[in-house]
Structures are given as C-alpha cells and as structure tokens.
Amino acid sequence: IVWARSASTRSFEGAVEMREVHEIRVGKNYKDFERWPEEAKRIENLRCFVVFYGSEFKLKSLSIAALSEKECELWVKGLRHLVPDTIHAPYPLQVERWLRKEFYAM
C-alpha cells in the first residue's frame, strides 16, 4: 500500500508491506482521527478505515479517509482479499516479489 497525505501530491510519502497488515477496521474510532477533531467531524464514519500493520508486538496504524463510502468499501474488500493471498502465496512467488521490491528500491 503506497500513500500520500493528499490526492494532489504527486509523490508518495510512505508504503506498507501487504504481508505486514494484520487488521483492517472500518470507521473512524481510532486515536488518529481524534488528533484532528475538526477535520474528522467533516468526514462520514463509513468513509474511513484503519490499517494496522507491522512486524513487532506494537502495531503501527494508517488511518485513511476515502472520497466516498463506495470507495472505502472497495478498498476494505480488496485489502481483506489481498492480504491473506499475499501471506499464503507459494514460496517461489514470495521470493520473486521480494527480489522485485529490492530491485526497484535501488
């Protein structure tokens, strides 16, 4: 998952490995949305979701506000399908993905 703070930004600010995603929650009931209460009030609950990821005990979070409820629904559905598919992929495919990621990171 590659992300930027706003849609107008051409470059990305961060990335999350699909194999590190542990949970996806719909709604804005998380501390990230409480940090900016004015902005959070303007966004409908069903347009928001949170991705919990990481390889350590304390997971990191990525709080996302989609442009519409339908877009949010599609993102959540897609991620919930892709994450297990990525984690349970055959070993040769995992190695290929890792090599490709490392190659393009050069």
Image (cartoon, rainbow, N blue to C red):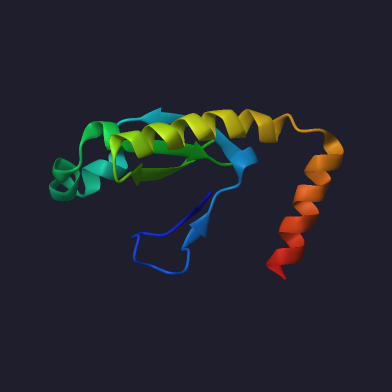
Residue found at x 48% / y 64%? 12
Q: Quadrant of the C terminus?
A: bottom right
Vertical side of 11 occupied by 4: above or below: above
Horizontal relation, residue 45 to residue 24: left or right: left
Residue at 82% across / 33% down in the picture? Answer: 90
- In the rendered structure, the answer to whether residue 37 lies left or right of residue 50 reads left
Residue sticking out furthest to the right: 92
Task: Please state the horizontal and vertical placement of residue 79, each as a whole percent of the image.
Answer: 52, 35
Which residue is at 24% across, 33% downward? 45
Q: Is residue 28 visible?
A: no
In the rendered image, which quarter is residue 27 located in?
top left
Q: Is residue 97 left or right of residue 38?
A: right
Q: Position of residue 54 (x, y in %)?
A: 56, 42
Query: Going 39% across and 31% down the picture, which residue do you hit?
Result: 73
Left/right placement of residue 17 relative to residue 99 reads left
Identify which residue, 29 or 81, lies in the foreground: 81
